[in-house]
Amino acid sequence: MQDNKLIIALDVPEKEYALNIVDKLGCCIDIFKVGLELFTVAGPLILEEIHKRGKKIFLDLKFHDIPTTVARAGVAAARNGVFMFNVHASGGFDMMNRCRDEVVNVCLRENINRPKIIAVTVLTSMTQEVLKSELGLQHSLNTHVRHLSGMVLKAGLDGVVASGYEAAMIKGHCGDRFLIVTPGIRPSWAVADDQARIMTPKKAIAAGADYLVMGRSIMNQADPVKAVERIQQEISGS
């Protein structure tokens, strides 16, 4: 049984390894994330191979550049048929809005399904102390996420990538239809790795997350399929 709330991160260094994961988990997962490592190794061909298997793609390249460059990258992502892609909210309103407008126009003109466009707020590997001491932000992490989320909504994007700890606050500020894609998800029986702000699947969904991105905590299990089933049961409460 497939659960569209779960997105499996293909954070691996080899094309064939990634496709083996898709083949193994395709029975219970519909959406797979292609990030910087895999895309740099395999290029757009990995998107074609995943699509051939009837699966959706979250292209996690976190575009962050001048508005023209990001808009062109967004159009390229749309033409590659991805289900969803992301940009960095810290790139600013004009960058996000320009990307959204050009993607919408191209999709209408070329009869392409429009991908969902979301923006990264604060990486789940970052803490309040990092924001203050390294980036020089004096206001709180929550205040920063709230501000960025409001700007993302104003720019016309579909939602954000954010920690489960900010999900309820974002929904309250931006509305229930505003998507929240949450990484840093770890079942209670898995190790935390390098994520600082982590949450269990059940708590993240309860807080307002629409999609959960998971990778190592599933693939490091002896039986990844059973791990997915266990997580689905945790989410549903069965």
Image: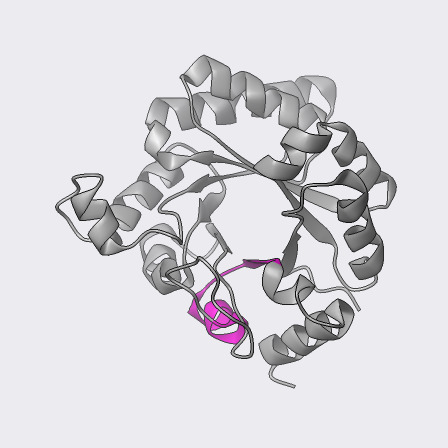
Q: How is the image coloured?
A: one colour
Residue 55 seen in the figure: no
Quadrant where the C terminus is found in the figure: bottom right
Residue 130 shown left or right of residue 95 in the figure? left
Q: Give the quadrant of residue 224.
A: bottom right
Residue 131 shown left or right of residue 74 in the figure? left
Q: Is residue 205 magenta?
A: yes
From the viewer's side, name the closer residue of 124 and 117. Answer: 124
**Residue at (46% x, 48% y) in the render:** 161
Q: Position of residue 198 (x, y in %)?
A: 42, 65
**Residue at (64% x, 21% y) in the render:** 76
The residue at the far bottom in this view is 238
**Residue at (54% x, 59% y) in the render:** 210
Q: Position of residue 8 (x, y in %)?
A: 66, 55
From the viewer's side, name the closer residue of 24 and 148. Answer: 24
Q: Is residue 195 magenta?
A: no
User: In this rendering, is residue 23 above or below 67?
Assistant: below
Q: Position of residue 220 (x, y in %)?
A: 66, 65
Quadrant where the N terminus is found in the figure: bottom right
Question: Which residues are drawn in magenta?
Answer: 200-215
Q: Position of residue 216 (x, y in %)?
A: 61, 60
Residue 80 seen in the figure: yes
Residue 150 shown left or right of residue 53 in the figure? left
**Residue at (71% x, 27% y) in the render:** 43
Residue 210 shown left or right of residue 229 in the figure? left
